[in-house]
Structures are given as C-alpha cells and as structure tokens.
Image (cartoon, helix red, strand yellow):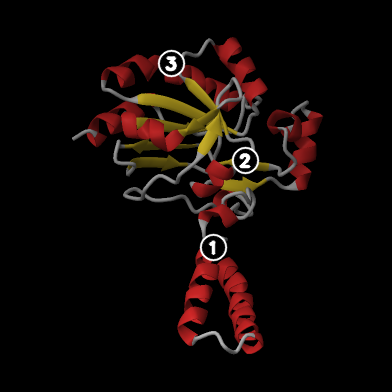
Amino acid sequence: MVVSNPKLRQERHVMPCVTSVIKFNERYNGMSMHSCVLFLSAMIGFILSDKIFSQDSGANAAASADAVYPIKVGATVPTLTLATADGKPFDVGEAIRQKPTVLVFYRGGWCPYCNMQLKQLVEVESKLLALGYQLFAISTDKPEKLQETLAKDKLNYTLLSDSKMIGCSAFGIAFKVEEQLVQKYKSYNIDLEVASGETHHLLPVPSVFIVGTDGIIKFSYVNPNYKVRLDPDVMLAAAKAALK
C-alpha cells in the first residue's frame, strides 16, 4: 500500500530551518540561546501549519484506488471549506456542528454508477432527515457541473464541489488516475479536466462517512471498486446506530 507520509515532508522543511537559525545566530552572535529557541519554534510552527500543506491537492493522493488510506472511525473530520452549486464557500465543519451528517463522496456527474447512487439517496433522504441528519454529496465536479446534476436528477439534498480535491485528500480517499485511463475516458466523451476545471487528474474512491455533531466519524464505507456502492438501507441502519 502506498501511503503519503506528511512527517517526511515536514522533516524536509524543518532541517533547513535549523540550519538557518544556526547561521542567523552566527551572524548575530549577541542573540541569546533562549531567543534562538523561540525563533526556531516559531519557524517550525509556521512551516508545519495546515496552511502550508492543505492547499496541495495532490500531496496526499494515492497512486491508485487500491492504495488509498482513508481516515478511520473515531477520527475527527478534517477542517475544510468546499463550494456550493452556486459557487459560494461552504464551511463543512460548521454545518456538521449543527446536525449529524452523512457525507457521500462520488466521482462526478459523468459517472453512471454515481448517478445511480445519487438517485438511490433520494429514496432514503426523507428518513435521514427524520432522524435529524443532513446529507451532503461531494465530488470533483466544479459548481457549474453540480447545477447540471441537480437539474438532471431532481435532487433536493446538497451537492458540494471539491474540484481541487483538497477535501478528498484530507479524508485519504484521493488517488491519481493513470494517463492511459484519462485518455480512454476522453474516447467516451468524459473529460476529467472539463468536469473539475482542474488538471490534477485526481478522483475520490466512492465513500460514505457518518459524522456526529462532535465532528467524530461514527461510520465509514470506502470501496475502491467504483461499481459497488453502499446499499441505502445499510446506510440508514448505520445512521440509526450512530445516534445511540
């Protein structure tokens, strides 16, 4: 299994910082060791902050669907802001704090298996709402494509765009599509770049995460076989169990 290791990326940045501080102290030898330590701590804190790594959509992408390493049940949902079908920013974490949430990650409106899943979700949506849940379906599609899906499938629940794949990467379900497959999709009139508006050629492994208002993941389903989706009745049962 191929797993991107953030710690290794961090270490590559930390060592130059240590060298820089040593050179800084040599140049300004009047600085106390305590001041050097404070300076080093500030530098490391800045470099290891989420702002440095959260914008790299491909940083945590696996080499294939079978190699993804999703976050586990019991973990806290990553902080992320996605886009609505209207192109407006949507704070997923803030929404989760208001109601328990079902997060469904799908590949895009161009995928027939995804469209089938989106339609199946309509069948359980009212039951999820009755339990107090809210339902968000997230894909790589840019907002304009989400509007097309909403109109085509007559959906009432919220679709969100993660076109840069930052959210999918944070959940550990992003993978790189091989160039040969990218070209094969084009022969079927499926253009990943047109759908997402990006050139990263990343897709999510279809997944479902059920999250409590505390931000903790209560249930997850991640299947590299994009043709097999979580049965809506199983999703509903899991949602009920997560409330206990």
Q: Amino acid at mark 2?
A: Leu
Give amino acid for label 3.
Val
Earlier in the chain: of badge 1 and badge 3, it is 1
For mark 2, give the secondary structure. strand
- Residue at left offset 74%, top offset 28%: 190
Count residues near mark 2 (Cα–Cα under 10 Å), then give few for <14, some for 14-19, many for 20+. Answer: many
**Identity of the residue drawn at 32% across and 19% down:** 129
Q: CA distance from mark 2 to mark 1?
A: 30 Å
Occupied quadrant, residue 20 = bottom right
Mark closest to the chain's N terminus, 2 or 1: 1
128 with respect to 155 (left or right) = left
Q: Residues within 10 Å of mark 3 (few under 14, many from 20)?
A: some
Percent coordinates x, y for residue 210 in the rendering: 35, 36
In the rendered image, residue 99, in percent from the top left (x then y), is placed at 31, 28
Numbered badge on residue 203: 2
Which residue in the protein does label 1 denote? 46
Which mark's residue is nearer the viewer, 1 or 3? Answer: 1
From the image, tell me which residue sits under label 3: 122
